[in-house]
């Protein structure tokens, strides 16, 4: 027999306190379902609204990139310092210990290698496998202005439809052709198209002029792509400028894993992103940590 329920008089209903209905902390994400918001909250810190994502997916089109030759030796020790890692399912299954709980942003597009036309990509992962691997988001390349622009956009919209079915957000990466101009006008166009067509987060490059117009005109969070390896102060300055101008964090690869001291670098970037640490101070932090932290 179940225990007899207490009288109404003895229960606590707090009738005078209305239930809270809070806005979700991430830009443009309030109307998403619970699973989507929960996954986004794994990637983005709800206190700062930002993330430090570590991109190590370069091998999907360019093979063993400098710094990523041995992910087991060089990257696995770094993973715990990142808010999320962006990688392929191959590296995830073979090399990342399943006991790790760092959120996964899985690369889901692929096809051409660096020897061919890069915009000729297709969706390269089944949604079931993404679910099986417990990913927090799926990443896909979008080539605005590229030879296979329409195909890459349709890849993204298909992925968004699949993601919506199962509550998995999609990160659209704005990929720029070698001969194309990287300026605010281009990135405003590319980011806005990705968001309009359903991307939940957009990854794009920093431009020194008018970057804030890119973040302002994109209705979903933008994370800054790192790009080629820069001197430490330049990379920290770029990350600082991007978050000050509206980016919701960074998704950096080479500037972290090709650094002289990747652990010191990711910690410095973390301070810039989450604590608004100024670049010069972050450089000093990097130098101090580099003397203490083993590579
Ligand atoms: C874009 O093509 C891929 O996601 C790259 O692997 C990633 O964006 C590169 O990161 P980074 O430019 O910071 O090395």
Image (tube, rainbow, N blue to C red):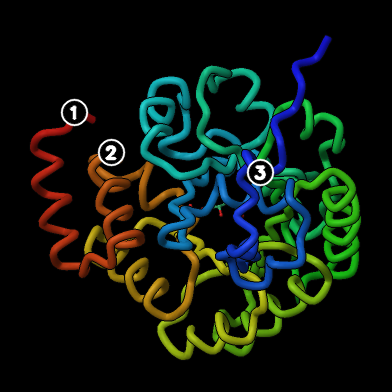
x and y, in percent, of residue 113 in the image: 71, 45
Image position of 99 with respect to 183: above or below: above
Against 277, is 13 above or below?
Answer: above
- For residue 146, above or below residue 170: below
Q: Residue at x 50, y 39 (%)?
A: 65
Query: Which residue lies under the disc numbered 3?
Result: 9
Q: Earlier in the sequence, mark 3 or mark 1?
A: 3
Query: Which dot, 3 or 1, sits closer to the camera?
Result: 3
| 203 relative to 155 in the view: left or right | left
Mark 3 to mark 1 CA distance (whole Å): 63 Å
Label 3 SS: helix
2 or 3: mark nearer the eye? 3
**Label of residue 294 in the image:** 1
Q: Residue furthest top?
A: 1
Q: Count all numbered tags in the image, as a single digit.
A: 3
Front-most of residues 257 and 181 = 257
Q: Secondary structure at mark 1?
A: loop
The spot of residue 275 in percent (x, y) is: 28, 61
x and y, in percent, of residue 91 in the image: 61, 27
- Residue at 65 percent across and 47 percent down: it is 38
Other-residue count near label 2 (Cα within 10 Å), few / some / many at <14 / 14–19 / ≥20: many
* SS for callout 2: helix
Do residues under tags 2 and 1 come within 8 Å of each other at their CB atoms?
A: yes
Q: Earlier in the sequence, mark 2 or mark 3?
A: 3
The residue identified by callout 2 is: 263
């Amino acid at each position: 027999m179940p225990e007899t329920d207490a009288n109404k008089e003895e229960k606590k209903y707090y009738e005078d306190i209305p239930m809270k209905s809070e806005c979700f902390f991430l830009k443009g994400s309030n109307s998403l379902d619970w699973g989507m918001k929960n996954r986004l909250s794994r990637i983005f810190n709800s206190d700062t609204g930002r993330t430090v994502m570590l991109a190590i997916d370069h091998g999907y089109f360019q093979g063993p990139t400098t710094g990523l030759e041995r992910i087991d030796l060089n990257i696995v020790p770094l993973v715990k310092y990142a808010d999320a890692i962006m990688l392929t399912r191959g590296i995830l299954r073979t090399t990342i210990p399943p006991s790790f709980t760092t959120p996964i942003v899985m690369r889901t597009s692929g096809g051409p290698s660096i020897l061919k036309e890069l915009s000729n990509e297709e969706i390269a992962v089944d949604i079931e496998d993404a679910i099986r691997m417990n990913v927090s988001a799926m990443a896909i390349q979008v080539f605005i202005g590229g030879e296979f622009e329409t195909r890459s956009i349709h890849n993204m919209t298909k992925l968004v439809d699949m993601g919506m079915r199962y509550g998995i957000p999609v990160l659209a990466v704005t990929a720029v052709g070698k001969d194309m101009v990287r300026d605010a006008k281009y990135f405003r166009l590319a980011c806005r198209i990705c968001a309009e067509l359903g991307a939940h987060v957009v990854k794009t490059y920093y431009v020194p002029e008018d970057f804030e117009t890119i973040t302002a005109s994109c209705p979903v969070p933008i994370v800054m792509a790192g790009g080629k390896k820069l001197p430490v102060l330049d990379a920290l300055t770029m990350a600082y400028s991007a978050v000050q101008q509206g980016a919701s964090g960074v998704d950096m690869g080479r500037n972290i894993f090709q650094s002289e001291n990747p652990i010191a670098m990711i910690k410095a970037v973390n301070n810039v992103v989450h604590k608004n640490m100024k670049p010069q101070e972050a450089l000093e932090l990097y130098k101090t940590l580099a003397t203490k932290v083993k590579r």
